[in-house]
Image (cartoon, rainbow, N blue to C red):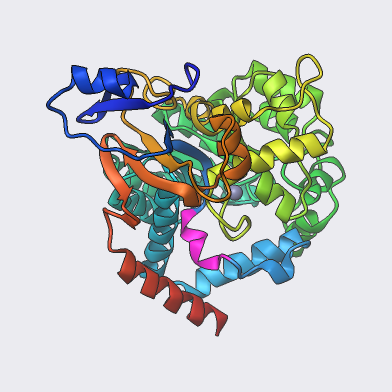
Amino acid sequence: MSSAPVADGAIAVDGSQIVGVGKRASLVARFHDARAQDFGEAAIIPGLVNTHSHLELTALRGFLEDVEGNFLAWLMKLTLARQYHMTPDDLYVSAAWGAVEAARAGVTCMADAGDAAITNMRALRDVGFRGIVHQESFGPDPALAHDQLEKLKEKVGQLRELETELVKAGVSPHAPYSVCARQLELVTDYALAQKLPLTIHASESEAEELFMFEGTGPFAEALALRGIEWKAPGISTIQYLQQHGVMRARPLLAHCVRVNEKDLEIIKAEDARIAHCPKSNAKLGHGSASYTGFLRHEIRTGFGSDSVASNNTCDIMDEARTALTISRARGDVIGDDEMVKAEQALLTATAGGARALGLENRIGTLDEGMQADFAAIALARAHQLPIYDPINTLIHSTSGRDVLLTVVAGREIFKEGRVQTIDEDRLRARIREIGGRIKA
Ligand SMILES: [Zn+2]
C-alpha cells in the first residue's frame, strides 16, 4: 500500500510489530535467527478492514431472503427472530461464528455495531481481533430520548470494562428513522464528552429518503402506527445529521447510497467517514453508491460487509471486487476519465479502512514500526493462474477463501486451515442447531 509490490518479498515480525519489509533474502540475512515461514506463491497484504458489520446477526444468514424488497418487513423479521428466538448464548455463538468467518477471510480489524455490543466485543476478543464495537441506541419517540440515553450509558459503561489494547468501545445511534433528533443530539454530546467513536446508518434506502423528504413511506407509517409524530425536515439525511450536530463527532456513515454532491461536500468538510457496503446495498435493492464520488472528494472510506443477513458473506476481497465492478457498471469515472482500478480497491480494503477508523498510524500498510496485522493469500490456484499483475489477480479473481494466514498484532489467529484461537467445531455444531431452531 505504501510501495509497489515486492517480488520474492517477506516481512519480519517481532512481538506485535513489523520490524522489516523487503526482499526475503535480505530479511533472512538481517534476521538470521528468526523462525521463518514460507507461503510459496502468495501475497502478503495488510490485514483487511471491515468497517461495518453486525456480528450478532450471523445466525440469520439466509433467513430473510423472502422479505427482501420490503425494507421495513425485513427489519421487522430480523428484529423479531433476534429478540424471541435467540438466547444470550445464541447471540454469542452467532457473533463468534461471524468472527471465525472474518478471520478465515483475512480480516484483521472490524468496526461492528450491535444491540448486543458487549457480546460482540467478547467474540472479537476471543478470536483475537482488533476493532471498535459500537453499542447501538434506538428510540424514535422524543419523549423517551433521555431514558434511552441513560440505557446507552449503562451499556457503554459495561462495554468499556471489556476494552483491551486491541478492542475499543463506540456508540451507534441506529439511523435517522429509528432514533429521534433529540436522541441524536444527546448521544452525540455523550460521544464527544467520552471521546467515543460514533457510527450511524445514513442515506441507505428509498424508504429513508421518503421519510426525510416527504414524511411518507414505510418508516413514517410505522411511526404513525406507534402514535409518534414525525414532521419530515425536507432535507437529506446528511444535512439533517449536520443540523442536529451529529457531524461534530466525525461519524462513520454506513452506506451513503443516496447522497448528492452537496452531501459529499459536507461529509468531506466535516471530516466524517464512510463505510461503503456495495454488496448489501445491491442485494437489498437499495441501489448503488458513488464510490468514485467518495474518492473524488477524498473522503476517508473503507469497505463494510454489513451483516451477513444482508450480504451474505463477510469477505472484504469480494466487497472490493464488487465495489469496483459496480462502479464501472454505473459508468462512473474518476480523475482523467478513468475507471476505478484494482490498486484503488485494494487500498480502500486496507489502508482506506484504517483511515476510516482513525487507525492509520497503526495498521493498513506493511511498514516497519506498524502493527503486525496482515494476511497471506494464495496466488497459485486454478482461478488465479496465470498471473500478469498480482494486484489485478487479487482484486479480480481472489476471494477471502484463498487466505492462508491471518495475523493480528503478531498473533496468528488463522493458519493451516483452522482458526487457532477458538473451538470452531463446537461453534459449528451450535450455529447449525440455532439455525434449525429459528427455521422451526
Ligand atoms: Zn448495518
Q: Position of residue 314 (x, y in %)?
A: 52, 51
Depth check: 131 or 324 in front?
Answer: 324
Q: Where is residue 194 in the image (x, y as percent from the top left)?
A: 40, 30
Picture residue at 20% right of the left edge, 17% below the top: 30
Q: In which quarter of the image is the C terminus?
A: bottom right
Q: Where is residue 222 in the image (x, y as percent from the top left)?
A: 75, 61
In-image side of 209 versus 156 (left or right): right
Q: Position of residue 367 (x, y in %)?
A: 36, 19
Picture residue at 60% right of the left edge, 66% below the top: 78
Residue 291 magenta:
no
Residue 57 magenta:
yes
Residue at the far bottom: name it: 440
Q: Quick check: 142 above or below 60?
A: above
The span picked out in magenta is: 55-61
In-image side of 382 versus 299 (left or right): left
Q: For the stretch drawn in magenta, what is the main secondary structure?
A: helix
In-image side of 228 versus 411 (left or right): right
Picture residue at 81% right of the left edge, 19% below the top: 337
Q: Quick check: 73 above or below 14?
A: below
Q: Is residue 289 visible?
A: no
Quadrant in the picture for residue 170? top left
